[in-house]
Amino acid sequence: VQFEGLGRVPASQLSDGQLSFLALAALLHLKEEASVVLIDEPEGHLHPTLLGTAAGLFVRLSQQHPLILSTHSDSLLDALPSDAVRVV
């Protein structure tokens, strides 16, 4: 991974949270339009301040692919548009 000001950092030196966030961002580049994306409790590995940014990624991803997201995080739910949330 290339960081501004730090240069190249190997993935083995990144935290679980950083790796999880990069994996979420990589989902935006899925090519298969028929892919259904299932994400279970993304808040478990993300710093709470990243939940809003992650919510934006989820909204963008849901415009490209069917997305099913499970969470126990009120903060994540609050960061999502109300019309994007379905309680099951």
Image (cartoon, rainbow, N blue to C red):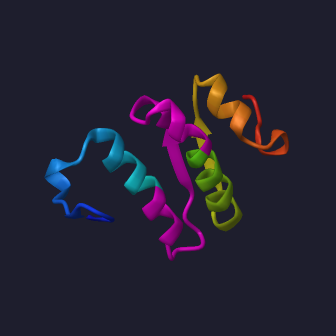
Residue visible at 48% across and 62% down in the picture:
27
Above or below 61: residue 68: above
Residue 41 in the figure: left or right of residue 55? left
Q: Quadrant of the C terminus?
A: top right
Whether residue 41 appears in this view of the structure is no
- Residue 46 in percent (x, y) is at 43, 36
| Quadrant of the drawing holding the N terminus | bottom left
> For this rendering, which residue is in front, 75 or 31?
75
User: Relative to the observer, which residue lies in front, 80 or 2?
Assistant: 2
Q: Is residue 49 left or right of residue 26?
A: right
Q: In which quadrant of the rendered view does residue 85 lie?
A: top right
The residue lying at 14 percent from left, 51 percent from top is 12
Residue at image coords 48%, 37%: 42
The image quarter in which residue 11 lies: bottom left
Which residue: 65% across, 67% down? 64
The residue sitting at the bottom extreme is 31
Residue 49, compared with residue 6, is above or below; it is above
Residue 46 lies within the magenta run: yes
Outermost residue, right direction?
A: 83
> What is the span of residues highlighted in magenta in the rendered image?
25-52
Tag count: 0
Judging depth in this view, the residue of 22 and 36 nearest the camera is 22
Residue situated furthest front in the rendering: 5
Residue 4 percent location from the top left of the image: 33, 65
Decide whether residue 3 is among the magenta residues: no
Place of residue 76 in the rendered image (x, y in percent of width and height, measured from the top left) = 63, 33
